[in-house]
Image: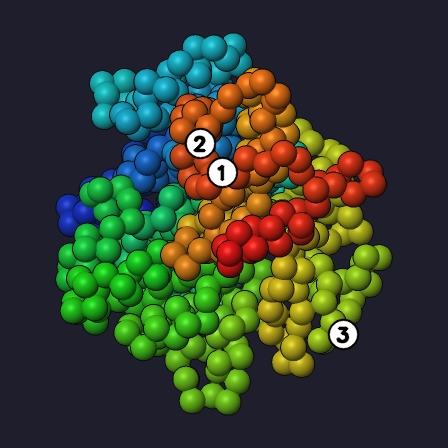
Amino acid sequence: MNLAALLQRAARTRPDSPALYKGRDLHANYATLGARAARLAGWMRHEAGLQPGDRVAFAMTNCVEFQEILWAAWHAGLVAVPVNAKLHVSDFTYIIENSGARIAFATPDLAEDLAGVVAALPSCELMVATETDTYAAALDAAPILMQPCEPTDLAWLFYTSGTTGRPKGAMLSHRSLMGCIYGYITDIDSISEGDHWLHAAPMSHGGGLYGLPFVAACAAQVIPASGKFDPPEIMDLLGDFPGLSFFAAPTMVKRMIEHPAVKSGDTSNLRTIVYGGGPMYVADAEAAYALLGPKLAQLYGQGESPMTITCLSRSELQDASHPQFAARLASTGRAFSNVEVMVADADDNPLPPGQLGEVCVRGDVVMQGYWANPEASAEALRNGWLHTGDIGVFDDYGYLSLKDRSKDMIISGGTNIYPREIEEVLLQHPAVLEASVIGEPDPDWGENVVAFIVPRPGNGIDEETIDRYCIDTMARFKRPKTYHFVESLPKNNYGKVLKTDLRDSLAARKSS
C-alpha cells in the first residue's frame, strides 16, 4: 500500500475538511492538498524525470510546503529524504550524496546553502526553493495517478547519527510507517476529525512522522507561522484550534510549563502533549501533570523503529490515584501493541523482570536496515531483532525503565548527539592533539556537550579559538558548551579513552 492513499482517501471523502494551516490561516483543505500533491508528483516524474524509487531530499524549516513535497514524493512512488534544517552544510552534503537524491528542495532561509551543495554534487541534478516561480510552476504541472507501491518499498530515509560519526539512513518502508500510524491511534491517543496536530518540533524527525495519523483520521495539521517551538505562539494558537496535540522533547515540555504565558493561559483546547526523544525527569513530568492536568502521553522510540517501542498512553496517564502511577510515570511505559520488546543479555537471550540488559525490538515498524551500509545493518538487526544500544529493565508488570546507554550518545534538548562525530571534527584542528567528548547533566537541556582537549605542543589554543572553529564546522546544537584543556586523557592498556574517568573528573571539578 502506498501511504499517499491516505491523503487521496481524505481528499475524496472529506474534500472540504481543513487539512493544513499556516498559523491561523487555512492553507489547504483536503481536496486542495490532494490536488497539489498529484500535480507536484507529476512535475517530479515528468519535468524532473524521476523514476519510482528515486530519492527526493528536502532541507526545510517547518512549513506547509514540507507536507506538499512529502505527500507528492509518495504519490509519485519516490523516497522522501527529509534533512534536519539545523544541521551544518557539511551534513547536508553528506546526506544528499549518500542517499543519491536526484533533486532537493529548500526553504528560502536554506536555499543558498543547499544550492552550493547541489552544485558540487554531480548526482543531484536540481535544487528548488519554495516561494519561487519554479516551485509555483511545479504546483501547476499536470497531475498523475498515484504510483502503486509494495508494502516493503521504501518511503522515508530517516538519517540518524551513528557511532561512526557519520549519519546513517534508516530505511523505513510504507509498511513501517503504517505501523507507526496504527501505533499512535491504538496505543497513544485517539483522533477525531475535528482534532489538530501542531508541528512544534522539527518535521524532519519524530514530530513530522506523527502528522501521518492525523491525515489518516482526516484531521488537520497546524504549522506555526514562526516555523518553530514558541510557547506564547502555541498558547495564542490554542484559542483557535480545539483538540490540539503536539510532540515535544522533555526540555520543550519544561519550557512550556515554566513560561508565564502557559501558567496563566487557557489550556482547555489542549488535548495531548506527546513527549519523548530523551528522558523526562519525574519532577518535571509531575509539574506538567499538575499544571496541565491529564494531557500527557509518553513514547520511547528511535529512528530505526520510528517512535514505536514503548509508551504510556494518554488514557493511562489519566488516573493519578493508581497505586503504580508514580512508578509508571518514571518508566517509558509498556510495549506498543504492534511490536515485541525484550531486554536481552549479550547472547540475545531474554532476561526476566528486574534484570538489566539491552533493549531489543522487532515488528513491522522496524527499519529494513541502513541505506548502503550492510555491515551496520547486520550488526543492528542481528538475530532478527533491532538492538537499540539502550540498557533497560522490565518490572513485573511489563513496564520498561531505561537505565543507561551502551553507546555514548548525548541527548540535549531532545536531539541525539554522538561524541565521536564531534571528536572527529575537533581532531581536524591543527592545534588539537587529542579530544574526547562526554555529556554533562543539565536541568534545562537534559545534557550538555563537554569536550576534553589535549593541545599539540607548541600550538597555542584557547576556548574562544576552538569554539569559533566549532561554530564554523558543525551544527550549533552539537558544539560543546564547555571545553577543558588537559595534558593527557585517561586510557586503558589498549589505548582506549576511559570516559568513566572523564565523567568522574568532571564531577570532581564541579564539586571543588
Relative to residue 329, is residue 274 depicted above or below? above
The type of residue carrying mark 1 is Tyr
The type of residue carrying mark 3 is Pro
Label 3, residues with CA under 10 Å away: few <14, some 14-19, many ≥20: some
Residue under numbered circle 3: 352
The residue nearer to you, when weighing 217 against 250, is: 250
The residue nearer to you, when weighing 70 against 362, is: 362
What is the CA distance from the residue labelled 1 to the residue labelled 3?
Answer: 42 Å
Residue at 48 percent across and 33 percent down: it is: 81
Mark number displayed over residue 463: 2
The type of residue carrying mark 2 is Glu
What is the CA distance from the residue labelled 1 to the residue labelled 2?
Answer: 6 Å
Residue 129 is situated, as x and y percent measured from the top left of the image, at 30, 22
Residue at 51 percent across and 21 percent down: it is: 460
Residue at 46 percent across and 64 percent down: it is: 280
Image depth: mark 1 or mark 3 in front: 1
Residue 401 is situated, as x and y percent measured from the top left of the image, at 60, 69
Residue under numbered circle 1: 483
